[in-house]
Structure formats: structure tokens, C-alpha cells
Image (cartoon, helix red, strand yellow):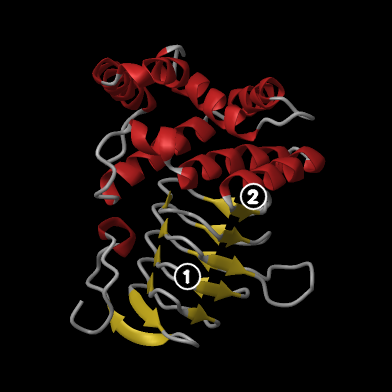
Amino acid sequence: MSLSVADLWSAMIREATEFGGNEPVLASFYHASILNHPDFSAALSFQVASKLGCKSVPAMLIRDVFNEAVAADPGIVQAAADDVCAHYDRDPACDHYGMPFLYFKGFQAIQAYRIAHWLWNQGRESMALFLQNRIATTFDVDIHPAARLGSGIMIDHATGLVIGETAVVGNNVSMLHSVTLGGCGNHRGPRHPHVADGVLISAGAKVLGNIQVGEGAKIAAGSVVLCDVAPFTTVAGVPARQVGREVRELPALNMNQSIGDDE
């Protein structure tokens, strides 16, 4: 269930206060990461910038760019809140709201991508590509800044994720590590997948080319998908083929990765 940015921030403040009291060694960490900031947006800019800063472009400069982006597009902050809630709702290992914010590189990489995407759309391609490189180096997640991602995204573990330039990912999508939304061909037009709302893409799946993955579809671990996937259909194999159909539920929300007609 998604929370408003204000309600999410209130919950994170309560958590950080409690955890900092219970573990004094981390009290300064919780203070610097959460309690020292006036709101969720400020804490998020600090978190992203502190991860991506380097000698040539310090964290303070990246934070300035982040703040410029969210001032122009407040939807970036709401999308981040939706992503936090997606992790909290779908990952049984995530038992408090601050966990993805502080510790999950999939969440952190997506928030940094959102800033790179805003820069790309402003024609600031050099800065966008710089952030893409820093995201790949820091998180082992490579998302082209021109790709279009919705909100309520959960990327579990995230290591090895690749999303290409013309890929489109809808809302409330869940992906695991080593997923590739890759291109087919060397032309400059659309050549990457379009993934609709509520899709679950399991670990190691490769979805290649300008194909459509319909709403509520499920792609099994290790599959190689080369053709369109119908809505509410499960595919598996190399190359992937249909192995089952879902009840009209969104598998991204229940994270059920079983395959077959008895799902």
C-alpha cells in the first residue's frame, strides 16, 4: 500500500529514532541519513549524492542537481516514496520503511536514475551519462537515462540489472537481479522491450528486442524472451514459451515465482 510522502517520512523518522536509540553505534548514521533532514526529499538527495559523489564531481554538486530536478518535477519524490512502499509490501525481508532507503542498492539506483532521466529530458546528456556511469560503478546497475520507468518499482538485490535506451517499464513492476531489458539490432529506433504494469521478471531473465510484455505477465528465472508476452501469461525457457496463465492478479505484487497451469 502506497503512503503519501509525508506519512512515509513520519514513519521513517520514528524508525530512525528507535533504531538509533537501540544501537548507539549507529546513532550518528541515522542522524546523518534521516534525522538531520527536514523532509524526505532532502534526505533522499543526501543519500543519492553521498553514494554517487567522487573526487571530480563532489557529492555537494550532485545534491544541487538533485534538488534542481525535484524542484522542477516533484513527481520524482512521490515515485521514490512509491518505490519504498513497493519494497516494504513485496519483500518479506523488508520489515521497516527505512530499509530500502538506507540499504537496498536497487532502490538507490532507481532514484539516481530518475535524476539522470530528468537531465536527459532537459538536453543535459553529458551530466545524465555521467550519472549513468556512476550508478553502474557504484551499484552494478546499468540503466540508460533515456529509458522510461514508472513508479512502484521493486528491484530485489539488483546486481547485474541492465535496462537499455528505448526500454519502457510500467508501474508496480518487480524485477530481480541479473535481469536484462536489452536491445536487438543497431538501428536508432525502438529496439528494447515495453513492459506493462504489474509484471514480474525473475532472476536472470533476458528480455530482448522491441517486444511487448503485457500487463500482469510473469517471466520465469533464466528465461530468454524474444517474442511478445500476452497479458497475465507465464513464460519460461530458452527461448521462452507460455507455460501457464495467471488468475487476474498482478504477480509483481505477490512475488509468486512458480510456473505451470496450477499457479
> What residue do we see at 33% from left, 60% from top?
252
Label 2, on which residue? 136
Residue 262, horizontal then vertical, whole percent: 18, 81
Asked whether, in this view, residue 141 is left or right of residue 166, the answer is left
Label 1, on which residue? 204
Asked whether, in this view, residue 207 is left or right of residue 214, the answer is right
> What residue do we see at 26% from left, 15% from top?
21
State the mark number for residue 185.
none
Q: Amino acid at mark 2?
A: Ala
Q: Quadrant of residue 117?
A: top right
Residue 19, horizontal then vertical, whole percent: 27, 22
Q: Is residue 236 above or below residue 36?
A: below
Q: Amino acid at mark 1?
A: Gly
Asked whether, in this view, residue 78 is left or right of residue 117, the answer is left
> What residue do we see at 71% from left, 38% from top?
119
Q: Residues within 10 Å of mark 1 (few under 14, many from 20)?
A: many
Residue lying at the far front in this picture: please name it. Answer: 25
Q: Residues within 10 Å of mark 2 (few under 14, many from 20)?
A: some
Residue 118, horizontal then vertical, whole percent: 66, 38
Residue 110, horizontal then vertical, whole percent: 53, 44
Q: Is residue 44 above or below residue 144?
A: above
**Helix, strand or loop status at disc 1:** loop
